[in-house]
Image (spheres, coloured by chain):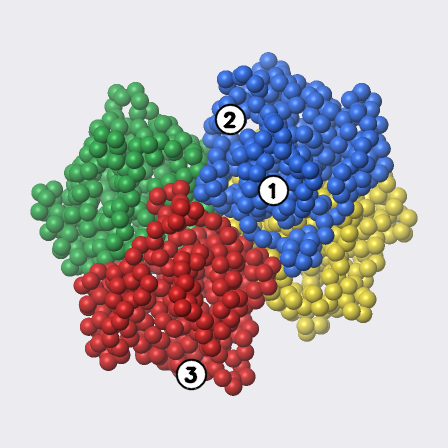
Chain colours: A red, B green, C yellow, D blue
Amino acid sequence: MSDIAHLGPIELLTPEAERSLAFFVDVMGMEIEGREGGSVYLRGWGDYQRYSLKLTESEDSGMAACGLRATSLDALRRRVAAVEGTGLGEGWGDGGRGRGPTYRFRDPDGHRFELYYEVERYEPPEHLRPSLKNQPQRYTGRGAAVKRLDHLNVLAADVRACRVFAVEALDYRLYERIELDDGSEAGAWLSATIAAHELIYTRDAHRANGRLHHVAFWVDTREECLRAADLFLDNDIHIEAAPSKHAIAQGFFLYAIEPGGNRIEVTTGGRFVFDPDEPTVVWTEAERAKGQAWGVKTVESFHTYGTPPVAGTSDDQRP
Amino acid sequence: MSDIAHLGPIELLTPEAERSLAFFVDVMGMEIEGREGGSVYLRGWGDYQRYSLKLTESEDSGMAACGLRATSLDALRRRVAAVEGTGLGEGWGDGGRGRGPTYRFRDPDGHRFELYYEVERYEPPEHLRPSLKNQPQRYTGRGAAVKRLDHLNVLAADVRACRVFAVEALDYRLYERIELDDGSEAGAWLSATIAAHELIYTRDAHRANGRLHHVAFWVDTREECLRAADLFLDNDIHIEAAPSKHAIAQGFFLYAIEPGGNRIEVTTGGRFVFDPDEPTVVWTEAERAKGQAWGVKTVESFHTYGTPPVAGTSDDQRP
Amino acid sequence: MSDIAHLGPIELLTPEAERSLAFFVDVMGMEIEGREGGSVYLRGWGDYQRYSLKLTESEDSGMAACGLRATSLDALRRRVAAVEGTGLGEGWGDGGRGRGPTYRFRDPDGHRFELYYEVERYEPPEHLRPSLKNQPQRYTGRGAAVKRLDHLNVLAADVRACRVFAVEALDYRLYERIELDDGSEAGAWLSATIAAHELIYTRDAHRANGRLHHVAFWVDTREECLRAADLFLDNDIHIEAAPSKHAIAQGFFLYAIEPGGNRIEVTTGGRFVFDPDEPTVVWTEAERAKGQAWGVKTVESFHTYGTPPVAGTSDDQRP
Amino acid sequence: MSDIAHLGPIELLTPEAERSLAFFVDVMGMEIEGREGGSVYLRGWGDYQRYSLKLTESEDSGMAACGLRATSLDALRRRVAAVEGTGLGEGWGDGGRGRGPTYRFRDPDGHRFELYYEVERYEPPEHLRPSLKNQPQRYTGRGAAVKRLDHLNVLAADVRACRVFAVEALDYRLYERIELDDGSEAGAWLSATIAAHELIYTRDAHRANGRLHHVAFWVDTREECLRAADLFLDNDIHIEAAPSKHAIAQGFFLYAIEPGGNRIEVTTGGRFVFDPDEPTVVWTEAERAKGQAWGVKTVESFHTYGTPPVAGTSDDQRP
């Protein structure tokens, strides 16, 4: 129903390029699809595009850009027109590796996005050819063996402005949100499909702009989240939040900090929203204070840390 | 992107009303939402509508009708117009319990469907109120504790005619299909969302019309399919096909025959289709002969048995 | 190799008899095997004895006694002789429902135990007869559907004295223990089989005596622990510690407080110890400070709360 | 209670040394502990010994020998005396890599076993050091990532003679067995611990001697069996029997044929036998005809194929 098919690829910045790459390949189990300049293109075994993650060496951590694939050329034109209407558009550019033209813009908080429609489907080399023809790539099982890019959570100084923009200009649906006692918004969970969340805005504790909270990769089962935790443990990856179940969206999570400093989630589950008129679920401050679904208190850094870290801020320490 | 939000409720017929009801309540773990005449209205704990299954006492087994909820009033009008254009429409009627007006029609094989848009959302009574507000009902965990209606597989003498109708008149997308060596079609897997299948047509071995292959209910994990098999075993429910993984759509399955004779599936998993231009996967006769994903040979009755059984046919025995 | 086959039945005391019973039957999914006086006898579907839990109405919570089944009559005599040698024996008594004579004694911390050998095997009534003959009872799947009593964790003012007693008088093996920087012992994990723990002593923060930390019931999969958490949530059972993995013994856990105040665990996993000469693993204070296996910080009440609560102690609040 | 702690290491023969090694390392996820002559020593991440599998290049497939570790020196002496009493002993030899002296003998069907007590515990190199000190090796997660050797199933022309020998000379307990209508024995499930099976004898359909049915490796969860099936599929390993649940012992299984021709199982689950007087479960011919726990018919080759194959026998084809 939305003009957006899905988000991605995402370009992630890392000051520890080599160690970050080792993490995504050996621990997350992604494949290197190619390299260009200071970037490496990575994919999960279930990604239908050539890549879903572009990892780029940089002085800082954080997200450089997030692609948004439209469902058709018409849908793309509609979204570009809507974004242009907000005055946040930046114009057309070359989509880069495996993509047609992209229309670049920034959301109200300054995160860069790229709208596009044309894209190349992945063609696996011989050693990665799958046995089942409805699967883009062989399942190698290496590391956490994430299947595909799932969702993005960015921080915003003004959550409300961003979620209104996402709904009106980007055609996302708002499934759940947090409204604090003072009426301000602390988080918004948006989706372009029946999946419970694809694009999430949560409040930046430092009122900084354009920062990343986390990038989430999908696995098919909760057992794979538990298994990923064992792998993180034995690969000296810092687990920020051990596997458990979110109250919001009911997704199963595992959060870790990759060597470059960015927060990464391994996720599965979550509810499907089949009702085209699903009312938005609004969580209160008191409800959020209960912690996650099974009462796990959210670790403090989860509320404060983002990338790139805010310079000179003592409470934005990397967990 | 489709005009259809989802299918359901489904009306199922049973000559063993009491035993079928006990199966859906005690073994499948559904709740009785209400009773009217010879029908009982049932729901999974994750169904947002009041009910997803209407179980009706009858001389024969089989499916009486399948609802199709449109995404909006406009979408409903478009679909009704498209169906009317095929000459298969039967006209508007009362939607019955918890639904607005429905437009009835038959697919080219004679199965009855009901298009509608207006619907009442479920309001749980006190003892079924959930702890998490993004969940329609409390999780009781009784029996297999199916979450919601997932998909429908009907048999058809002419699969191709039905799938063309589903794509053109109903706005479904065709994700996978089987084409035999003689060029005929043996199966079509269609969906209105990113889920790998919602409406399936497979060839009726007896070239009969309007028959049901199976109705599938969703659980969130493969472990729940395995657990359901243990429950079926200890409740004397005939397991036709033990839990395993399909090659087509990659769903995880468990098939059983409910006391009224209808085939029921407990399902989870399956791939998501995020590419708006996903090419249809076409399986050949040789590929299908390999069995399911892990080499399990499909049990013979799966290819021949449907409900209602074909009178006087020796090879349409209930498994 | 040990003279002890396993522990249990355990007699648990509750000041909320009716609500505790509802918890064990409806939420934990145990069966009522019988009632006598103010006690109800309960069993998991995999317990081979008639019952593994005796729930007794009482003014206080806590554990009244824990049975210890010897592997043979000779083994029983050896253990009785060894206990008598410590001066802690109390003499023979009637084993009660379904058991032969029991020899009663108290461990150095005052917990009551009962050694016995003779026992009646469970014979299921018709409606609980299993399909597989190597299973004592039908799998009903009700609630968390715990399979059997697994292990016992009692608190002790002097952990070292208790674990020495358990090894020398009771023939348990010591697999893991905690030694604090001051040389004192904070915990001991003992077993009579290859299972990683069956009897656990941890330090009583209040230096009280004879108190219970928790009784653990087994499920076969981690998914069943996660499912149990959903059931606890929707049945208003306080979850003290959400499902995660212990570092010690590597068991998977879910801790909750039953209505009578006793801490209950739903557990699975853990390592098997096949080496007859397995060296005891000694955990340091620093290692314990890291939390559980995946870095989950242990909730404070876990270190302080036991049953019965210590009267007049402000920090022994029920979680 | 038994004089035997566990079985293993097992020496497996393969005419396809290189491909078999690739299978055990890349697909099963075992580590190479060392090489000597034409043999490679392999281990699972949870094996406490240096190795549990010795893979030896040979003209034929099959099992060369199976170690049996006694629980103590006294236990070893008792077992050696008992075996000598049967006339099947062959005398003491060098235990080879990481083991003290071994006493070699053959069971009544001619399979070679090696009794021993002294053994070296595994010391991981730096890159395989685990995070949790109660774990012998780091969890790499490579391939199916089997944890340890679990059990052995050998074929025998005379099952009864072998199981009597295992009970009387080797101190195993008989938990389950199959007795056909003609009174002959078709299978015996024996264990030295609470695990439901460690040593299995099933009837050799060809009345050949000394053949192997399968060697089983343990994983902690059923989900890992399902995952292993996906890995086998995408690594062109022939799956003989897809994941499902056995009726006997209730273990969860996945059977495949490794490149050298030997049948390999990935297993988990199964019941624990805590009753020291557990009556042996006897399965009848009719009960076995029902197939596995959930009604899966056992594939024919499972009843006929063993290694080494019987020369010139048309129905002993490799599956």
Distance CA(mark 3)–CA(mark 2): 67 Å
Residue A222 in sight in this render: no
- Please state if B122 lies on the left or on the right of C47 as rendered: left
Q: Chain letter for mark 3, please.
A: A
- Callouts 2 and 1 on one subunit: yes
The secondary element bearing badge 1 is classed as strand
Residue named by callout 1: D218
Closer to the chain start, of discs 2 and 1, is 1
Q: Position of residue D9 (x, y in %)?
A: 69, 38
Amino acid on which the number 2 mark rests in the picture: Arg
The secondary element bearing badge 3 is classed as loop
- Please state if A163 lies on the left or on the right of C263 as rendered: left
The residue depicted at 24 percent of the width and 75 percent of the height is A91
Distance CA(mark 2)–CA(mark 1): 24 Å
Residue named by callout 2: D318
> Pointers 2 and 1 in contact (CB under 8 A)?
no
The residue depicted at 76 percent of the width and 26 percent of the height is D105
The residue depicted at 39 percent of the width and 81 percent of the height is A209
Q: Chain letter for mark 1, please.
A: D
Residue named by callout 3: A207
D224 or D129, nearer to the observer = D129
Amino acid on which the number 3 mark rests in the picture: Arg
